[in-house]
Structures are given as C-alpha cells and as structure tokens.
Image (cartoon, grey):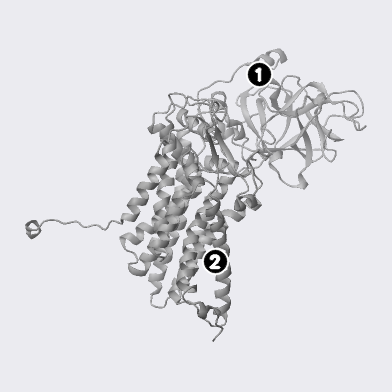
Amino acid sequence: MLGFLKRPVVVTADINLNVVALTAVGLLSRLWQLAYPRAVVFDEVYYGQYISFYMKRIFFLDGSGPPFGHMLLALGGYLGGFDGNFLWNRIGAEYSSNVPVWSLRLLPALTGALSVPMAYQILLELGFSHCAAMGAALLMLIENALITQSRLMLLESVLIFFNLLAVLSYLKFSNSQKQRPFSLSWWFWLMLTGVACSCAVGVKYVGVFTYLLVLAVASVHAWHLIGDRTLSHVRVLCHLLARAAALLVVPALMYLLFFYVHLILVYRSGPHDQVMSSAFQASLEGGLARITQGQPLEVAYGSQVTLKNVFGKPVPCWLHSHQSTYPMIYENGRGSSHQQQVTCYPFKDVNNWWIVKDPGRHQLVVGSPPRPVRHGDVVQLVHGMTTRFLNTHDVAAPLSPHSQEVSCYVDYNISMPSQNLWRLDIVNRESDADVWKTILSEVRLVHVNTSVALKLSGAHLPDWGFRQLEVVGEKVSRGYHESMVWNVEEHRYGKSQEQKERELELHSPAQMDVSRNLSFMARFLELQWRMLTVKSDGSEHKYSSSPLDWVTLDTSIAYWLHPRTSAQIHLLGNVVIWASASLATVVYALLFLWYLLRRRRSIRDLPEDSWLRWVLAGALCAGGWAVNYLPFFMMEKTLFLYHYLPALTFQILLLPAVLQHISDHLCRHQDSLCGWSP
C-alpha cells in the first residue's frame, strides 16, 4: 500500500528552449521602456476616456466593439491604482503623476510579446519544420508595425493575440483528435478554442471574421468525421455535440458574460445616456433615474406626461409645442394652417409636457380612483403650458409635403374645425387589454380622422421653427418605423384644474421613492442594437487610408510628436516583410490552383499528408488574411493602417510555410512538377 513512499517522486518535463527564448526576446522588445513617452499617443485619447468611465462606474457606449477589450485595458488601470481623474482631451497631452502609464500599456505589450511564440507553435502544429516555425516567429518579432502597436494602450495586439490563440488551440485540438479523442487535453484545447474565439469577438467586432474562419475549418473536419465508417453513430453524435457546445454555446455564453460584467461595472448615468431608451436610462443610477423614481406606472386620464421619440435620430427629442405659429406662407409659396407649432425638442423643457384627456369629459386632472388608458382607447393630448389640443389636418407638412402638418389647434373661426382625436396603439403590447405604462410601453398615436400616425421626420425646421425637429403625420399604411413610436418618459398625476396652478405643478419636480430596473437581457439587447447601429464619424482623417494603400504600404500614421525635441512615433510597416508576405500569398494561390488542376487530371504531385497540410495551411493562413482584409472594402467607416495588422499576421505565418514548401517539393522535384504524365 505504501510502496510508493520507498521511491522518490520524479517529475519530468520537456521544455522547448526555442519557445522560451522567443518569449523572452518578445517580452524584452515590448516591455523595455514601456512608459515612454509619458504622453497621450494617438488613439490612447480614445480608449483612455473609457478607462476613466470604468474607474468612475459611468455608463458609456462605444460603437467600435464589445466591451471586453475596454475592460482588459481598464483592468490594467485598476491594478495600477488609476482613479480615472485625467482629462483625455488631446493627443500629446502629458500624463499626470496619478496615471499609471506602464500598467495601462502592460496588457497590449504582453499580448504582443506572446504572439511571437504562438506564431512558432502554429507552424509546428501545421506540420512544418522548426526552421519555418522559427522564421515565422522572428518575422513577428521584428515587424516594427506590430512592435509599435503593442507598446501602446491600443487593442490591435490584443485582438491579434486572441486570433492566434483561437487558431493554435484548434490545431492542438485537431492533432489531439488523431491520437486521443475525448481525452483531457482534447477537451481543454477544444474549449479553449471557443473561449479564444469569443474573446476575439469581444475585443473588436472584426474578430468575428477569424471566428467564422475557425468555424468553417471545424465544419469541414466535422463533415469528414461524419463519413468515417470506423466510428459508431453514437460516437459521431458525441463528437458533433462536443464541437457545437465548445464552438457555439461557449462563445455565446462568454459574449453575454462580457456584457453582464460591463453593465455591472458601469451602473451610473453618464454623457452617453441620451442615446439609450428611457427605460435603459431609468435603470442607471442618477440622471433620468432621479426624475423617474416614484412616478405612477399606469398612464391615466388626466396624467401629465412627456413623450420621447423611440427612434432617437438624428438626436433624442421630446414632443414639444410653444406659442409660435407656423408662417402663413412658406418660402416655396405653399400655405400652412397658421396654427401653433408642434416640434420635437432635444432638450428637457417645460413645454414638453402634455395632458392626457378623456374626449368625453372636461377634467384635466386624474380622478379617484385613476382610470388607466388602454390599448385602442381614443384620447386627446392637451399641451400643458398653452392648453391647446394636439391636432392635424389634411395640410402638407412644412418640410415633408407628402406628410401632414401636426399642430396645436387655434380656433380662427374659419372653416377648419379641430381634429384632435388620437387612438392609442401600444406596439409592444402582450394583449389588446394592455394598459399604457410609463417608460415601458412603446406607443403609436394614430389620428382618428385621417389615419396618420404621429411621426418624427428628423428634418430641422428653419429659423421660424427655432431649428427644432419637424413632427408630421404619416400614413400608417406606408409601413412601421421607430420614428412613429413614442414612450412616456416623465409622468405625474395632474391634481389642479386651474391653469395657473397647473403651470406651477408642471414646473415642480416629481416625487422620488421607487426605481424600476430592466432585466439584463433587455438591457443587453438594447445596448447591442445601439452599438451595431450607432453611426461612426464618416469624416476624413488626415491619416486615414484605403485598404489598397495597406498592401502597398503607401500610408503611415504619425502617432506622436514631442513638442520640444524631434522625437516622433510613426506607425510604419517593414517594406521587405510586407512585400514578401504579399508575394507569398500570391504564390500560394497560384500553386494551389495548379495542384487542383493537376489533381483533377489524377496527377498527384504531393503525397496525401503533404497535400492536406498544404490545404490546411492555406485555409488558416491565406484564409485568415482574406477574411481579415477583404471585408474592409465594404465598410463605410474611417480606416487606418492599423486595421490591416490582423490580416498581416496571417500573411506572415504563410510566408515561411510557402518557402518550405518550395524548398521541399518544387526545388527537389522540378521535373515532376513540369511533367504531365498520367
């Protein structure tokens, strides 16, 4: 029983000194004098703001990608003791003493350094020689664009790291599949593949291209697995379920986890709130939540409400009116109703308040008990400060002549009677008996007489309309759009029937005692949608470039210039490496097509194992370059040279693979290459 105590416990390990040396040199090249320069460099001004938001727990919205990359950068700031108190207002600003520059730049530097030995390992897993693997690693090590990008507080090196980790993990898993399927290492590498793919997507949306590439290669392998008659049906099913769980379910859960942690961390109101819905804003601490807490949930006849347009474009705004009327004649000669203007105003204002009135009663106060307004009910909306009714006629809108003008009715004692009845249509109702709810209900107001819906056109009115946004009546038959949808943001029960007292009531703040929070999934879906649909700044930048400029290296970026000396940092590629990598990609494509044509003629130039290695190397390396480069031709956003770095990384991996293939199979077998024998 205790015989093992009579012998020493011996642990042996194989250490690849190449990997150790590459890691050490990679760390040295990325970490040496990492805190220099102690000034904001290029996009550090962009990411630094989000790090400060994390430190202060302030909500923000970034349309460039999911929050995982930002959280990793913020983790460096947290570990370095950063308090978030730095004004990220310009490139070149000197960092104050409270900014841990080394800590903030540490994670990109580490990921950039570790990408060097990973390139070595990927070539080995693909079946190439140590010489080829060492060549790929050295190219990664000395490529100055990769060095520059990884020494700053930027995310490209982090994205490249997870891209390479996903490919390496899948290759490790694929090789384990040949020897020990369902072993502990098999499960480890399979799960790590899914985790790395989700992390790549979580850093930047463009990480999804590498994820799809890995999925495509895994799908082809799974398809061949299904045709393996040596495996039982149950065994094949287990293989497929394991891959689906690791490569589909795990990444989805990880992606949700990134947003869950993000929303826990940024729970306070901030400058980006206005982009979000009223319900989302009310779930944040401070801001709108301070106003909406304690509001009645159900809108009743006599309720005083503000109506926010759900679409929120071009800017978030609220249904608004004021004493001014539409001009009798517009600049183009068309006439108007000359009634009181109704607009959408992008600021909080007392003129945003409306009273929900029962058409059959004169009261403008909430009864006891309150009578809730339900889906399908007909209501009148009375402007709180002027007591005029929301109205529309068959009169063309000022800037949208195919739509109807919306106004507050002024009785000029002419043949234009009021048409101020509106039917409530709760868009997100669960049943036709649903009650109109504060914040939660999204509603359309459909005009009873003309069947038009109250809609934000988004056009800015001229000076006579104070540059506010146009509101029109749009035929419902023309289709549903979010610009027709409104929700009650602020709400109180009206108590005074007298106008003077009611005006004082509208100016007074609401009571605060209860908060309503959205579920995580509701917040996640809204935030995800806003991130995907937010418009990026399409303006040209002095250092912006096109994808064609990247391949030819006909562009660069001036990252930083010392204000007093001639010290500078530029993002420049190594011309020799970039040209060689591009040439290797062309050579691979030509050779691949040549081999395919000859195989079609039943001429096998390569042994089957060499052919499969050649195809897999092309799928992952040439394919990795293609999926990370070609989509940029279809993107309508400002592009920079650093967007090419993930694609370049895969090209660098392909270069030594092509050179070894030429050395092993073309130089030694030139006669067989030219021969056309069956």
Disc 2 marks which amino acid?
Tyr
- When the figure is inspected, residue 661 is found, relative to residue 488, above or below; the finding is below
**Residue that numbered label 1 is attached to:** 506
Between disc 1 and disc 2, the foreground one is 2
Q: Position of residue 487 (x, y in %)?
A: 64, 34
- Check whether the beta carbons of the residues at disc 1 and disc 2 lie within 8 A of each other: no
Q: Which label belongs to residue 588?
A: 2
Instruction: Please tell me whether mark 2 sits on a helix, a strand or a loop.
Output: helix
243 vs 559: above or below: below
Number of residues whose C-alpha sits closer than 10 Å to that of mark 2, classed few (under 14), some (14–19) or many (20 or more): many
Decide if residue 505 is on the left or right side of residue 204. Answer: right
Q: Residues within 10 Å of mark 1 (few under 14, many from 20)?
A: many
Depth check: give the residue in front, 356 or 14.
Answer: 14
Drawn side of residue 439 relative to residue 333, left or right:
left
Which quarter shows the N terminus? bottom left
Q: Specify the quadrant of the image occupied by residue 171.
A: bottom left
Q: Which badge, 1 or 2, comes first in the chain's sequence?
A: 1
Q: Position of residue 199 (x, y in %)?
A: 46, 48
Dot 1: what SS?
helix
Q: Residue at x 6, y 58 (%)?
A: 6
Q: Position of residue 264 (x, y in %)?
A: 45, 35
How far from the left and from the top, in percent, is residue 168? 42, 57
Residue type indicated by callout 1 = Leu
